[in-house]
Image (tube, helix red, strand yellow):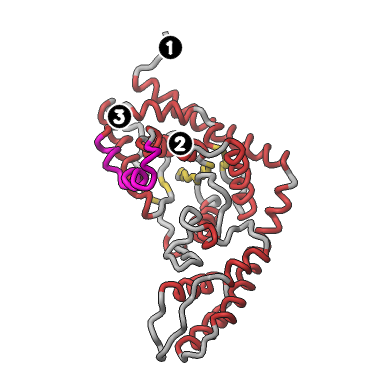
């Protein structure tokens, strides 16, 4: 069975973009592969979150994972910092990572432009820690978006470099998991091309949003003055509404509003009311489960503990063998 590894930073709650972009595929994947899904709390430290916020965010992501359909009996779900073997492998991989290649990383260049007051070593070696997350389980595949493809290539480089230096075939060279036609990139309600909490919190519909909050966000979604001629090309903001409707509404509902738009008869207020209803109906089972899980702290602790124990079995084996290959043996 193939091994698949994926993680998400605990920066708040998961939103619809996360669900259609990855979570829906994860739910299917856990039945087909040996899956490790982790909450990347070490990675979030590059932005220096408050300790109380970090702890709360870790719990929220775990709740959202479970409510969305990840099953701790099928997949290994754990918190990154509960697996210290990852940090030791991170240290070892740093010995095979060169400053020049890390400085050329696109995400590092973008981060230092946006946050020039916080260019820390963690940002520079971010790809090395990501590689450790993957290689600690000697993964075959890694689900990645376009913005993370370079990091996966770097993980392959580090693995191949280790194999070359120590004349071994130990590490597999992980490849990107192919989501096929199931991967959907959801746009934001603010007219942007991606639903992202880092850009605009109001543009996201979170899985944990109460119905009234979801409705309020949708009704405030950016629109334009409407089409002035039949079959007019849609603006980005309007295309976003149709894209959202495509994934949460019934086909005949989408067809109705498409026809209304093409006939220059569309009323955006009516469309947004319908879209809000459909989003609320879609997220209702997940939201209900989120509320239930919030009242089950002992169950959440058990899931995290069980996940850490399962992840440790794989990690201890990998680290032991890596240390032996390097020559780090007890006297």
**Disc 2 versus disc 3: distance between alpha carbons?**
18 Å
Q: Earlier in the sequence, mark 2 or mark 1?
A: 2
Secondary structure of the magenta portion, mostly? helix
Provide the secondary structure element on which disc 1 rests.
loop
The residue depicted at 43 percent of the width and 65 percent of the height is 192
Q: Residues within 10 Å of mark 2 (few under 14, many from 20)?
A: many
Q: Residues within 10 Å of mark 1 (few under 14, many from 20)?
A: few
Per the image, the residue denoted by label 2 is: 137
Q: Magenta stretch: residue 111 in it? A: yes
Q: Which residue is disc 1 drawn over?
A: 330
Please identify the residue farthest to the front as the structure is shown. Answer: 117
Magenta residues, start to end: 100-119
**Disc 2 to disc 1, C-alpha distance:** 23 Å
Q: Within 10 Å of the Cα at label 3, are there few (<14), some (14-19), or many (20+) other Cα atoms? A: some
The reply to whether callout 3 and callout 1 are in contact (CB within 8 Å) is: no
Residue annotated with mark 3: 96
2 and 1 marks in contact (CB < 8 Å): no
Q: Which mark is residue 200?
A: none
Q: Alpha carbon of mark 3 to alpha carbon of mark 1: how far? A: 22 Å
Q: Position of residue 78 (x, y in %)?
A: 57, 39
Q: Position of residue 1 (x, y in %)?
A: 47, 44
Q: Position of residue 2 (x, y in %)?
A: 45, 45
Looking at the image, residue 307 sits to the left or right of residue 236; the answer is right
Q: Can you say whether 53 is above or below 90 in the image?
A: below
First-in-chain label (2 vs 3): 3
């Amino acid at each position: 069975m193939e091994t698949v590894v994926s993680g998400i930073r605990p920066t708040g709650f998961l939103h619809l973009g996360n669900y259609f972009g990855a979570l829906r595929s994860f739910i299917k994947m856990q039945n087909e592969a040996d899956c490790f899904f982790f909450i990347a709390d070490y990675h979030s430290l590059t932005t220096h979150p408050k300790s109380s916020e970090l702890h709360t965010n870790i719990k929220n992501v775990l709740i959202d994972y479970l409510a969305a359909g990840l099953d701790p009996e099928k997949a290994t779900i754990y918190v990154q910092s509960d697996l210290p073997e990852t940090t030791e492998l991170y240290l070892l991989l740093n010995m095979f990572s060169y400053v020049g290649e890390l400085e050329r990383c696109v995400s590092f260049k973008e981060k230092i432009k946006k946050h020039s007051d916080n260019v820390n070593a963690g940002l520079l070696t971010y790809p090395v820690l990501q590689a450790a997350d993957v290689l600690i389980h000697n993964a075959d595949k890694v689900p990645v978006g376009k913005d993370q493809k370079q990091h996966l290539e770097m993980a392959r480089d580090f693995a191949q470099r280790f194999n070359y230096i120590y004349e071994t075939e130990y590490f597999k060279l992980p490849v990107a998991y192919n989501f096929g036609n199931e991967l959907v990139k959801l746009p934001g309600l603010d007219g942007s091309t991606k639903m992202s909490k880092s850009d605009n919190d109001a543009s996201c519909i979170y899985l944990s949003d109460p119905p009234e909050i979801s409705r309020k966000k949708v009704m405030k979604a950016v629109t334009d003055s409407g089409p002035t001629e039949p079959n007019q090309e849609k603006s980005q903001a309007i295309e976003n509404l149709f894209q959202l409707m495509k994934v949460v509404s019934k086909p005949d509902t989408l067809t109705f509003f498409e026809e209304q738009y093409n006939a220059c008869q569309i009323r955006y207020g009516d469309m947004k009311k319908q879209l809000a209803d459909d989003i609320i109906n879609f997220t209702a089972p997940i939201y209900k489960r989120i509320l239930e899980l919030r009242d089950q702290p002992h169950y959440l602790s058990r899931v995290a503990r069980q996940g850490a124990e399962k992840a440790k079995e794989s990690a201890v084996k990998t680290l032991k063998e890596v240390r032996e290959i390097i020559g780090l043996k007890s006297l």
